[in-house]
């Protein structure tokens, strides 16, 4: 199974999402980024697509 490797741009977007949500709710920010990563992994696992995020 391929491992998802995040591009620096994707990592920046995740950090920006985290920072924005964390201004009001740190727990929600952590959860949102975690769920984004889990959903991306699941999509690529099910589709068989090997690509870089």
Image: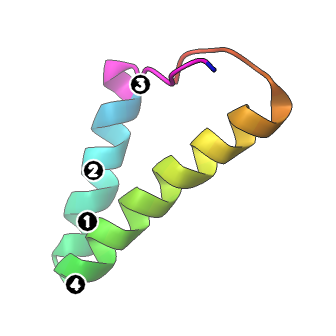
Dot 4: element: loop
Q: Nearer the viewer, mark 1 or mark 3?
A: 3
Spatial distance from mark 1 to mark 3, Cα to Cα? 20 Å
Specify which label sits upstream in the sequence, 3 or 4: 3
**Which of the two residues, 5 or 19, is positioned nearer the viewer here?**
5
- Residue under circle 2? 16
Q: Secondary structure at mark 1?
A: helix
Q: Residues within 10 Å of mark 3 (few under 14, many from 20)?
A: some
Magenta-drawn segment: 2-9
Q: Residue placed farthest to the front in the image?
A: 1
Circle 2 Cα neighbour tier, 10 Å, few/some/many (<14 / 14–19 / ≥20): few
> Horizontally, is 47 left or right of 19 in the view?
right
Q: Are marks 2 and 1 in contact (CB under 8 Å)?
A: yes
Q: Which residue is mark 3?
A: 6
Which residue is located at x 53 percent, y 52 percent? 38
* Mark 1 or mark 3: whose residue is earlier in sequence: 3
CA gap, disc 1 to disc 4? 9 Å
Disc 2 is placed on an element classified as helix
CB atoms of marks 3 and 4 within 8 Å: no
Q: Position of residue 49 (x, y in %)?
A: 76, 20
Write the residue at 41% across / 31% down: 10
Considering only vertical position in the picture, is 29 above or below 18? below
Q: Nearer the viewer, mark 3 or mark 4?
A: 3
Task: Identify the residue position indicated by label 4 in the image.
Answer: 25
Q: Is residue 8 left or right of residue 35?
A: left
């Amino acid at each position: 199974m391929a491992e998802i490797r995040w591009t620096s741009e994707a990592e920046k977007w995740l950090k920006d999402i985290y920072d924005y949500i964390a201004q009001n709710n740190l727990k929600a920010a952590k959860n949102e980024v975690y769920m984004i990563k889990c959903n991306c992994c699941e999509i690529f696992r099910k589709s068989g697509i090997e690509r870089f995020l």
